[in-house]
Amino acid sequence: MPKIVDHEQRRTEITRGLWDVISDRGIEGVTYGAVAQATGVSVGRVQHYFTSKENLIHAGCQAIVDRASRLYTERVRGLNPWQALLDLLTEPIPHTESFKRGSAVWYAYLARGVVDPAIGAIIVEASRGTVDEAASLLRTAGAPPAEAVRLVSLSNGLTQRVLVGAMTADEAIPVLRNEITCLQRISDGGASQTPVAHCPKLPPGPPESASAPGWTSDIVAGQRHQPPPAERPR
């Protein structure tokens, strides 16, 4: 019987190898050889699935977005809008050193997007999608959807601060939780137009969403791609 090849699985394995390379060397360090070594396959196999280095790098960026969307959908199934919003905003915040490595891959793409229109377009679409999702959750919860831009921007800023070590995840996550709790109190009280700046600051609770793995779960959970023994280069 001819061997059945799962081409999508092979592409996924190569993409994860790509993320490992970016995590270690940055996008500038991406070569067919480096990705092949990280994946444990031949250079020819990488070239078979990705016809150019640019195609490989772009596919890796899109794969991050697609994975994040899929994992988010799975995590928030059955949650109410406020719980889903908290997950959406806190999921990117790295809470371990290994999560920081994964976040660094995304920010490497973010920097590359300034000079690479294809990557920039992927990031812009993903960013708009996050804001749209936040607005939809707020609208469903009876809160002002216009708050979505502010909340997503706050999440982005806190993620960057944690990534560079300016604050910890345990400090950052309660900031977002307080903002959401404040909006929820305003919404429940029927004062949907009350400025959020007037909300009382609430005591932080345990960062329950910090443990939710995001798109970085393969890299940042210490589960770097390990090729099957038969495929590892000799």
Image (tube, helix red, strand yellow):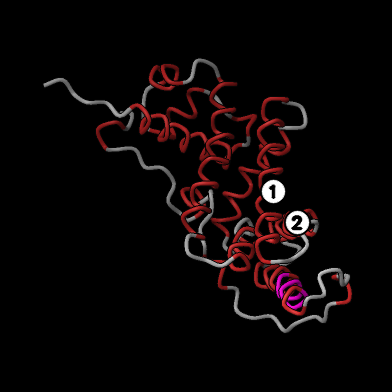
The residue that appears at 43% across and 31% down in the rendered structure is 14
Q: Position of residue 118 (x, y in %)?
A: 67, 25
Mark 2 surroundings within 10 Å by alpha-carbon count, few (fewer than 14), some (14 through 19), many (20 or more): many
Q: Which mark is residue 132?
A: 1
> Please, what secondary structure does the residue beneath circle 1 have?
helix
Residue 120 on image: x %, y %: 72, 31
Q: Nearer the viewer, residue 2 or 134?
A: 134
Give the percent coordinates (x, y) of residue 17.
Answer: 46, 36
Q: Secondary structure at mark 2?
A: helix
Eyeballing the image, is 122 above or below 73? Answer: above
Which residue is under mark 2? Answer: 148
Question: Residue at image x 36%, y 30%?
Answer: 10
48 and 37: which is toward the camera: 48
Amino acid on which the number 1 mark rests in the picture: Asp
Image side of residue 227 versus residue 85, left or right: left
Residue at the (52%, 66%) spot, across then down: 79
Q: Dot 1, how many residues are within 10 Å of its Cα: few (below 14), some (14-19), or many (20+)?
A: some
Mark 2 touching mark 1, by CB under 8 A?
yes
Position of residue 105 relative to residue 197, above or below, is above
